[in-house]
Image (cartoon, helix red, strand yellow):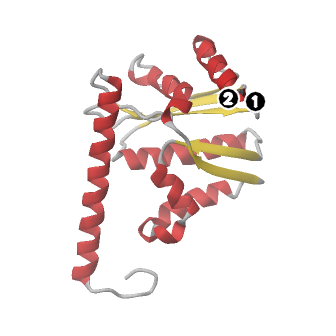
Amino acid sequence: MFEGKQSALFELVENKIVESEMWSLAQVEEQKEDLEERGDGTACQKDGFLRGVGTRLGVGAWVLRDEKGKVILHGRRAFSEIGSLHDAKLQVLVWSVESIISHHQNKVIFALDDGDITQMVLRPKAWPNFKGEIWLILGKLCGLEWWKLVKEERANNRGALLIAKGVTKGGQTHSYVAAGPPAWLLGCFENEEVSSSA
């Protein structure tokens, strides 16, 4: 039963299997692209999410910039027992929204490199099987005065990825939020600031 409508059990199971296969195939292709792009055997996501090979540890990072691209705040968090890349990205987005709200930011554009989550939120009727996830995200976004969710190219979110890498490469599993960019990434963020204002 879904939304008070009863469907044949066979049809329901068949739809779920097809969706699962399509989702799994998309994840495999995405990881292949990541491996080819990096060339070092590590799968990565430019939206600040990393998942180590053979582990259930996920890491998320976000960067808050002003209208000129200058970094105001950034944060990082490790997540344990991650079931899938999709679940990890969902958790990172929810945590990011909560963090932004807790720092009294009321008007925010969220730029993700994940087209699926972006489309789920912007076109919920086209994603009926993800209603729970959609309502979770929208419920968090309602805490903002104004928000926008956009698909961003991976290369434009390099700083968040590098912050997240501190966990997988450096073993720094503590979560934090800090003002400005991290000192060790100052050059990276200054370059992004210049390119964003050009």
Name the residue carrying label 1.
68
Q: Secondary structure at mark 1?
A: loop
Q: Residue at x 28, y 77 (%)?
A: 12
Closer-to-camera residue (49/104): 49
Label 2, label 1: how far apart the Cα atoms are:
7 Å
Q: Are marks 2 and 1 in contact (CB under 8 Å)?
A: yes
Q: How many marks?
A: 2
| 136, above or below 100, in the image | below
Q: Amino acid at mark 2?
A: Ser
> If the image is split into quadrants, where does the N terminus sit?
bottom left
| 114, above or below 53, in the image | below
Q: Amino acid at mark 1?
A: Lys
Name the residue carrying label 2.
196
Closer-to-camera residue (57/163): 163
Q: Secondary structure at mark 2?
A: helix
Left or right of residue 31: residue 130: right
Left or right of residue 66: residue 153: left
Left or right of residue 37: residue 67: right
Residue 5 visible in the picture: yes
Residue 58, image x, y percentages: 41, 36
Residue 179, image x, y percentages: 71, 24
Q: Residue furthest front?
A: 198
Specify the quadrant of the image occupied by residue 183: top right
Residue 130, image x, y percentages: 44, 64
Q: Residue at x 29, y 34 (%)?
A: 55
Residue 174 visible in the picture: no
Specify the quadrant of the image occupied by residue 33: top left
Q: Which mark is residue 14?
A: none
Q: Are there few (<14), some (14-19), or many (20+) residues within 10 Å of tag 1?
A: few
Residue 86, image x, y percentages: 40, 49
Left or right of residue 140: residue 15: left
